[in-house]
């Protein structure tokens, strides 16, 4: 029998993930069954379960795609010399986030995952791990901003990073649910808040 190549496995995996994405966006995470994904992918039961034993595994794969892109943006920002001003760094992050906001974007699924994570401990642990990693990355941006005098030197960097990270889901949740504000308007509001921060 011919050997299955790594390229073939990667292509089959992408095929299944994209089928799951379409199902989740169309029917919702909770209402989509593995049988729905199998039918959408046009593959056998065994072929799908070989790669993804459960819906949670599928949602993890979809999340990893979006998170991987965001992580690369954050890594580039953390390595930037000289560091970008904080609002410019946030603008770079939100620019990437905007690519995930379309009708087929991963962030529409993210909101469904938040709800499902309240009843699925494995999914809750996955979300908590990924969000903790984002807060750590934002901590680097906060420390750069403190060194540049943008933020108070005596501020708790971890607490400030958690608050700064909160701007990201705060924006995309509003965009998905209400269609507004646009990125420029939102960043103007963030800039106003940061400019009001007393320097010490």
Image: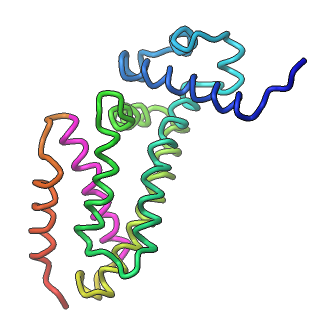
Residue 44 at x, y percent in the picture: 67, 10
| Position of residue 52 in the picture relative to residue 59 (left or right) | right
- Look at the magenta stretch and give its main secondary structure: helix
- Rendered residue at 64%/25% (across/down): 12
Quarter of the image for residue 174 reads top left
Q: Nearer the viewer, residue 131 or 179?
A: 179
* Quarter of the rendering occupied by the C terminus: bottom left
Q: Is residue 69 above or below residue 46?
A: below
| Position of residue 171 in the picture relative to residue 17 (left or right) | left
- Rendered residue at 9%/68% (across/down): 192
Does the segment drawn in magenta span residue 145? no
Quarter of the image for residue 109 reads top left
Does the segment drawn in magenta span residue 164? yes
Q: Is residue 179 above or below residue 125?
A: above
| Position of residue 35 in the picture relative to residue 157 (left or right) | right
Q: Which residues are magenta?
A: 157-176
């Amino acid at each position: 029998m011919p050997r299955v190549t790594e390229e073939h496995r990667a292509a089959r995996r992408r095929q299944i993930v994209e089928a799951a994405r379409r199902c989740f966006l169309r029917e919702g995470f909770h209402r989509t069954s593995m049988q729905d994904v199998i039918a959408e992918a046009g593959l056998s039961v065994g072929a799908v379960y070989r790669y993804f034993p459960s819906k949670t595994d599928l949602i993890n794969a979809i999340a990893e795609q979006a998170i991987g892109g965001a992580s690369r943006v954050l890594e580039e920002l953390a390595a930037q010399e000289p560091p970008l001003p904080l609002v410019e760094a946030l603008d770079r992050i939100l620019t990437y986030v905007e690519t995930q906001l379309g009708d087929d974007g991963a962030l529409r699924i993210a909101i469904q995952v938040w709800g499902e994570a309240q009843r699925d401990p494995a999914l809750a642990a996955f979300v908590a791990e990924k969000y903790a990693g984002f807060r750590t990355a934002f901590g680097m941006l906060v420390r750069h901003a403190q060194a540049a005098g943008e933020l108070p030197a005596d501020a708790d960097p971890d607490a400030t990073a958690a608050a700064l990270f909160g701007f990201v889901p705060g924006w995309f949740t509003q965009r998905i649910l209400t269609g507004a504000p646009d990125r420029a308007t939102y960043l103007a509001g963030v800039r106003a808040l940061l400019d009001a921060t007393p320097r010490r």
